[in-house]
Amino acid sequence: MNYFTRRRMGMARYVLYKNRNWENTYPVEEIQTAFTAGLIILSILLILFFYKNKKRLSRKALYETAGVFILSGLWIGFKMLNTTQSIRAYYFILLVFGAAAVIQILKAAVRIMIELRDQKR
Protein backbone atom coordinates (compact mmCIF):
# COMPACT_ATOMS: atom_id res chain seq x y z
CA MET A 1 0.00 0.00 0.00
CA ASN A 2 1.55 3.27 -1.06
CA TYR A 3 1.56 6.58 0.80
CA PHE A 4 -1.40 8.12 -1.03
CA THR A 5 -3.65 5.11 -0.50
CA ARG A 6 -2.90 5.10 3.23
CA ARG A 7 -3.51 8.84 3.39
CA ARG A 8 -6.85 8.54 1.57
CA MET A 9 -7.97 5.74 3.89
CA GLY A 10 -6.97 7.82 6.89
CA MET A 11 -9.04 10.74 5.62
CA ALA A 12 -12.05 8.47 5.05
CA ARG A 13 -11.79 7.21 8.63
CA TYR A 14 -11.56 10.80 9.88
CA VAL A 15 -14.68 11.81 7.93
CA LEU A 16 -16.61 8.82 9.30
CA TYR A 17 -15.43 9.68 12.81
CA LYS A 18 -16.52 13.32 12.43
CA ASN A 19 -19.93 12.29 11.02
CA ARG A 20 -20.56 10.01 13.99
CA ASN A 21 -19.26 12.59 16.44
CA TRP A 22 -21.47 15.38 15.02
CA GLU A 23 -24.54 13.13 14.97
CA ASN A 24 -24.00 12.17 18.63
CA THR A 25 -23.10 15.68 19.84
CA TYR A 26 -25.47 18.00 17.95
CA PRO A 27 -29.11 17.80 16.85
CA VAL A 28 -28.06 17.65 13.20
CA GLU A 29 -31.52 17.11 11.68
CA GLU A 30 -33.02 20.05 13.57
CA ILE A 31 -30.12 22.30 12.56
CA GLN A 32 -30.51 21.28 8.92
CA THR A 33 -34.25 21.90 9.02
CA ALA A 34 -33.82 25.33 10.61
CA PHE A 35 -31.08 26.26 8.13
CA THR A 36 -33.24 25.12 5.21
CA ALA A 37 -36.18 27.22 6.44
CA GLY A 38 -33.93 30.24 6.95
CA LEU A 39 -32.32 29.82 3.55
CA ILE A 40 -35.69 29.59 1.83
CA ILE A 41 -37.05 32.63 3.67
CA LEU A 42 -33.97 34.77 2.96
CA SER A 43 -33.94 33.72 -0.70
CA ILE A 44 -37.61 34.53 -1.16
CA LEU A 45 -37.24 37.90 0.57
CA LEU A 46 -34.26 38.80 -1.61
CA ILE A 47 -36.04 37.74 -4.80
CA LEU A 48 -39.13 39.76 -3.83
CA PHE A 49 -36.93 42.77 -3.03
CA PHE A 50 -35.26 42.39 -6.42
CA TYR A 51 -38.57 42.20 -8.32
CA LYS A 52 -39.94 45.18 -6.44
CA ASN A 53 -37.02 47.30 -7.68
CA LYS A 54 -36.35 45.42 -10.94
CA LYS A 55 -36.64 48.42 -13.26
CA ARG A 56 -34.01 50.39 -11.35
CA LEU A 57 -31.41 47.61 -11.13
CA SER A 58 -28.69 46.48 -13.53
CA ARG A 59 -28.08 43.08 -15.09
CA LYS A 60 -25.38 42.40 -12.51
CA ALA A 61 -28.04 42.52 -9.80
CA LEU A 62 -30.10 40.07 -11.86
CA TYR A 63 -27.13 37.70 -12.10
CA GLU A 64 -26.46 37.97 -8.37
CA THR A 65 -30.11 37.15 -7.62
CA ALA A 66 -30.03 34.23 -10.05
CA GLY A 67 -26.94 32.99 -8.20
CA VAL A 68 -28.94 33.02 -4.97
CA PHE A 69 -31.61 30.89 -6.57
CA ILE A 70 -29.06 28.43 -7.99
CA LEU A 71 -26.97 28.04 -4.82
CA SER A 72 -29.98 27.76 -2.53
CA GLY A 73 -31.47 25.15 -4.85
CA LEU A 74 -28.16 23.31 -4.93
CA TRP A 75 -28.02 23.15 -1.14
CA ILE A 76 -31.62 22.02 -0.77
CA GLY A 77 -31.32 19.50 -3.61
CA PHE A 78 -28.11 18.02 -2.20
CA LYS A 79 -29.69 17.78 1.25
CA MET A 80 -32.78 16.02 -0.05
CA LEU A 81 -31.04 13.60 -2.43
CA ASN A 82 -28.09 12.43 -0.33
CA THR A 83 -27.31 11.00 3.10
CA THR A 84 -24.23 10.18 5.14
CA GLN A 85 -24.56 6.60 3.91
CA SER A 86 -24.42 7.59 0.23
CA ILE A 87 -21.71 10.25 0.54
CA ARG A 88 -19.20 10.09 3.36
CA ALA A 89 -18.39 13.80 3.31
CA TYR A 90 -22.09 14.73 3.40
CA TYR A 91 -21.87 17.16 6.33
CA PHE A 92 -18.71 18.80 5.02
CA ILE A 93 -20.26 19.32 1.58
CA LEU A 94 -23.47 20.69 3.13
CA LEU A 95 -21.40 23.10 5.17
CA VAL A 96 -19.61 24.39 2.07
CA PHE A 97 -22.82 24.67 0.01
CA GLY A 98 -24.59 26.42 2.89
CA ALA A 99 -21.77 28.92 3.33
CA ALA A 100 -21.73 29.61 -0.42
CA ALA A 101 -25.51 30.18 -0.44
CA VAL A 102 -25.39 32.57 2.53
CA ILE A 103 -22.46 34.50 1.04
CA GLN A 104 -24.32 34.77 -2.27
CA ILE A 105 -27.42 36.10 -0.49
CA LEU A 106 -25.30 38.73 1.24
CA LYS A 107 -23.54 39.67 -2.01
CA ALA A 108 -26.81 40.08 -3.86
CA ALA A 109 -28.40 42.11 -1.06
CA VAL A 110 -25.40 44.44 -0.86
CA ARG A 111 -25.33 44.91 -4.65
CA ILE A 112 -29.04 45.76 -4.74
CA MET A 113 -28.75 48.21 -1.84
CA ILE A 114 -25.68 49.91 -3.37
CA GLU A 115 -27.35 50.31 -6.73
CA LEU A 116 -30.51 51.72 -5.17
CA ARG A 117 -28.44 54.10 -3.03
CA ASP A 118 -26.43 55.30 -6.03
CA GLN A 119 -29.61 56.08 -7.95
CA LYS A 120 -30.89 58.32 -5.14
CA ARG A 121 -27.80 60.53 -5.42
Image (spheres, rainbow, N blue to C red):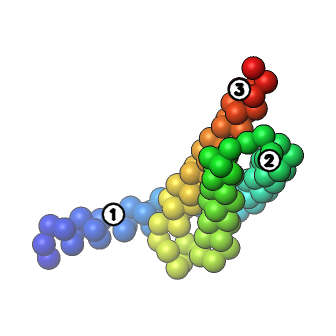
- Dot 2, how many residues are within 10 Å of its Cα: few (below 14), some (14-19), or many (20+)? some
Vertical order, 40 against 10 (above or below) = above
Query: At x 75% / y 28%, what residue is drawn?
Result: 119
| Numbered disc 2: secondary structure | helix
State the mark number for residue 104: none
How far apart are the alpha carbons under marks 1 and 2? 47 Å
User: Which corner quadrant of the image does residue 6 belong to?
Assistant: bottom left
Q: Nearer the viewer, residue 112 or 34?
A: 112
The residue under label 1 is which amino acid type?
Answer: Met
Residue occupied by mark 1: 11
Q: Is residue 84 visible?
A: yes
Q: Is residue 49 left or right of residue 101?
A: right
Q: Residues within 10 Å of mark 1 (few under 14, many from 20)?
A: few
Amino acid on which the number 3 mark rests in the picture? Asp
Residue at horizontal 62%, vertical 46%?
A: 60
Residue 37 % position (x, y): 79, 56
> From what the image shows, is residue 20 above or below residue 119?
below
> In terms of secondary structure, where does tag 3 sit?
helix
**What residue do we see at 64% from left, 62% from top?**
70
Among the two numbered marks 2 and 3 on one chain, the one whose residue lies closer to the N terminus: 2
SS type, badge 1: helix
Disc on the earlier residue, 1 or 2: 1
Labelled disc at residue 54: 2
